[in-house]
Every structure is written in structure tokens, then in C-alpha cells.
Image: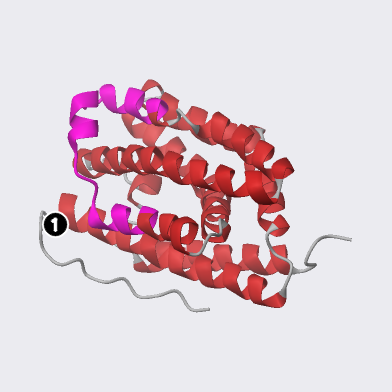
Amino acid sequence: MPSRPGLRERVDALLDSFIKDFYETVPYARHQKSAEKIDLEYYKRHNIETILRLRRKRTIDALAIKYFTKKDPVQAKAWAHYTDDEMLHDRLFAADLAKVGVSKEEIYSTEPLLSTKLLTGYLQYGMEFEDSPLALIASVYFVEYTTTRTQPEWLDNLEKVLGADEVKGQRAHVNTDLDDDHDDFVWRVLTSLVTTDEEERAVERHLHHIYWLWKLYFVELHQRTVLGKEGEQIALPTAAEA
């Protein structure tokens, strides 16, 4: 008997609706997926932000491990192993950026976008002030699920436009998620935290918040790199329907 039967089907359907909404409502949403000419400033900054986000998530993962060591040592070991797998994946993205002229010095001296700070701050808030990794694990499931269902197509197009060697690191990152069934693993950890109907509702609430923050990120990314509106107020994205 699966833990919280029906929850994963509802969550996956919700994430599928987010993917659909993303392509329909976010500016430049299909750019890396289907553009015949890639806007390199957009592409570079997206990968820089990915690296900066991964670096900040390492700290939040450590807080989750600390939580699990007190509450569930089995999950502490499992999350430590998962974190070990993902810990240095920022190097994969940095290697790809080097091939389009972005140095490590430029990457690590870049101030993260406001939306990146808000997204990672939301996850850290859960650990620091709610003493719960639920928002973090829900976010990781969100990323694992949506990555494996969107990024292979994006990388196919980027490989066609930029070259296979230029996206080698990103391809390795996605292949790790696919080969190791990371979405199934993260789901098992997530459901270990969900024992009540209220916690089920909290998962879905976190996913709505996380998706809104991701939309904000892509809106800000487009605004900064394509429209050139640096420092201006971010145009707020519309929320996906529940």
C-alpha cells in the first residue's frame, strides 16, 4: 500500500499543468527549446544563475541532513548520498560556460538575480524558521520532475545550435537524474514527511509557491538579458491555476 495513495498522481498532474502554463505564459519560455538562434546573453546568465542557485542549495541541503539526523537517520543517510551526487554539479555548468567565453571569476563574482535570492530564501526559511525540510524536498521533487520532462528537448536544440561539446556538462547533469531515477528517490523522501491531510495540502501549497518563484525567475531573466531593463521592477508573473 503506497504512502498517501493518490498524492503522487495529483502532484504530478499539478506539475504537468505548471509545465503547460510555463510555455504558454512566460516570455522566451520556448527559446532554448526551439530557437534556431540562441540569445547568448540569456543563455549565459541562465547557466550562471543555475550555478549560483546550486551553490546556495548546498547549504540548505546541509540543514536538511541536520534535521534528518535528529528525526530519521535513515533519511539522513539517503539525503546525504543524494546531496553527494549533486554537490559539485555546478562544475558541469561552469565547464559549458567556459566554452562560450564565461570564466569562473565572472560566474562567482555575479550578484544573483533577486528571484534567485527569493527562491533559495524561501527554502532556507522552511529550514530555519519552520524547522521542516518539506518546502525543500517539495522543491527538489519539482525540479527533478520538470527537468527530466523538459530539459532533454532543450538540450537537443541547444546541441543542434551551439554544438554537442558546448552542452556536455548540462547533458551529464540531466542524464544523472534520468539514470538514477532521482524523481522516484526524492518522492520517497518527500512522502516520509507527509503523514496527515494537512501535510498533503502543505506540499501542494509549497509547489504553487515554488512555481510562482520559478516564473518570477524566468521573467526577470528575460527582462534583464533580452529587454535590457536592469534594475527595474520585475513584471510579476501571473499565477498558475490550481
Q: What element does badge 1 sit on?
A: loop
Res. 68 in view? yes
**Colour scheme of this structure image?**
secondary structure
- The answer to whether residue 183 is magenta is no
Occupied quadrant, residue 118: bottom left
Residue extending furthest right? 1
Q: Which residues are magenta?
A: 91-120
Q: Residue 180 placed where, x, y %?
A: 66, 34
Q: Amino acid at mark 1?
A: Leu
Number of numbered tags placed on the structure image: 1
Per the picture, the main secondary structure of the magenta-coloured stretch is helix
> Relative to residue 100, is residue 179 drawn left or right?
right
Q: Residue 183 placed where, x, y %?
A: 64, 47
- Name the residue tied to disc 1: 227
Q: Residue 37 placed where, x, y %?
A: 26, 40
Neighbour tally class for label 1: few under 14, some 14-19, many 20 plus, Cα within 10 Å: few
Front one among 223 and 197: 197
> Relative to residue 219, is residue 14 drawn left or right?
right
- The answer to whether residue 119 is magenta is yes
Front one among 171 and 120: 120
Q: Residue 182 placed where, x, y %?
A: 63, 41
- Check the picture and name the quadrant holding the N terminus: bottom right
Occupied quadrant, residue 59: top left
